[in-house]
């Protein structure tokens, strides 16, 4: 565990394992420990670096207005303070936008991109359709248990929830998120506003030389699979859709996702060693 200064803010980060570095960037309302299913599975082959975005967990917010650009600078600063020049980047949801900005700002440092349950424009992820407005209200009204269950219903498919102990799952996910699922800390709204102001859609072609993987869940209500498919097409990336997954895909489908990430990062490592460039159009693959 360490603290890396970024614009005078000490950011909390963890580094586990040895080998090529993989930077893990979380989404709205989730601390770096949310990556535990990936860290535990991949640390035997890679140096897995996760951190708390500013304003959440053990990282203070600071006095700089929150933006995707600032959070991308934070991420790069963590790698600078760790003495790591080149690295792979994995981002989930808002973390996918931060990952895109990291790659746009420092393309020579990024070996590969893995973009999970995300989109090219933050407005797409923060737009309030009638259904999402109802879901957002359910997160804030009723008993604590009702709010926990509302969060589970937002991030997990109904069919999956029918097969598990929902109370136990809420406790497990709460430990990964760093908060009780009934709580909505103030930073969540700040992160959503920052996300809504950012778009990389017009610049995706600048990243087409990077090995990129885009993963969506068919039942994702926040980052719909059509948004993931459009992101993959813009990047010329491989697209994989998990047919049974929701927004919490890295938790729900950890084993399958980890195998996919290992395959993608291994291939990117081979490309980096040979100075080869990926070629060919985006490939869509159900899983």
Image (cartoon, rainbow, N blue to C red):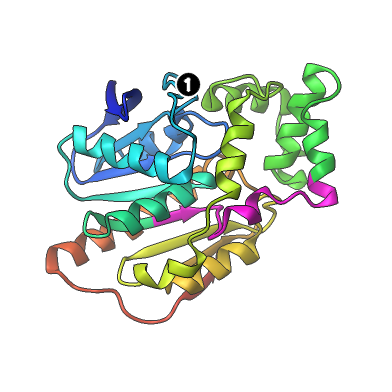
Viewer-closest of 100 and 276: 100
Left or right: 135 with respect to 97?
A: right
Q: Which residue appears at 52% of the width and 27% of the height?
A: 176
Name the residue nearer the viewer: 56 or 15: 56
Residue 247 is situated, as x and y percent measured from the top left of the image, at 62, 46
Q: Which residues are drawn in magenta? A: 114-132
152 is higher (above) or lower (below) than 219: above
* x and y percentages locating residue 2 in the rendered image: 27, 21
Residue 64 in which image quadrant: top left
Identify the element where label 1 is drawn.
loop
Residue 121 magenta: yes
At horizontal 56% and vertical 58% (from top left) the residue drawn is 119
Q: Quadrant of the C terminus?
A: bottom right
With 260 as the anchor, is 129 left or right in this view? right
Q: Nearer the viewer, residue 42 or 124?
A: 124
Image x and y of residue 264, in percent: 34, 59
Residue at x 24% of width, y 33% of height: 17
Please give left or right for residue 81 compared with residue 232 in the image: left
- Can residue 269 be seen here? The reply is yes
Q: Is residue 237 visible?
A: no
Residue labelled with disc 1: 57
Nearer to us in this view, 42 or 11: 11
- Vertical order, 274 against 190 (above or below): below
């Amino acid at each position: 565990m360490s603290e890396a200064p970024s614009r005078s803010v000490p950011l909390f980060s963890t580094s586990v394992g040895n080998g090529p570095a993989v930077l893990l960037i979380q989404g709205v309302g989730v601390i770096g420990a949310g990556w535990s299913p990936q860290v535990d599975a991949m640390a035997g082959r890679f140096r897995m670096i996760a951190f708390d975005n500013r304003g959440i967990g053990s990282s203070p917010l600071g006095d700089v207005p929150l933006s995707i650009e600032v959070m991308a600078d934070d991420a790069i600063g963590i790698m600078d303070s760790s003495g790591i020049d080149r690295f792979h980047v994995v981002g989930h949801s808002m973390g996918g936008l931060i990952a895109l900005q990291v790659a746009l700002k420092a393309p020579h440092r990024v070996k590969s991109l893995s973009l999970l349950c995300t989109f090219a424009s933050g407005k797409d992820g923060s737009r309030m359709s009638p259904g999402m407005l109802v879901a957002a209200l359910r997160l804030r009204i009723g008993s604590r248990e009702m709010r926990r269950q509302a969060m589970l219903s937002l991030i997990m498919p109904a069919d999956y929830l029918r097969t598990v102990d929902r109370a136990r799952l809420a406790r497990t996910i709460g430990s990964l998120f760093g908060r009780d699922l009934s709580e909505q800390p103030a930073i969540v709204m700040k992160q959503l506003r920052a996300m809504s102001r950012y778009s990389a859609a017009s610049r995706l072609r600048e990243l087409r030389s990077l090995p990129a993987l885009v993963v969506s869940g068919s039942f994702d209500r926040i980052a719909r699979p059509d948004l993931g498919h459009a992101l993959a097409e813009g990047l010329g990336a491989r697209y994989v859709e998990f047919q049974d997954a929701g927004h919490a895909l890295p938790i729900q489908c950890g084993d399958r996702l980890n195998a996919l990430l290992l395959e993608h990062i291994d291939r990117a490592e081979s490309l980096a060693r040979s100075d080869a460039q990926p070629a060919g159009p985006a490939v869509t693959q159900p899983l």
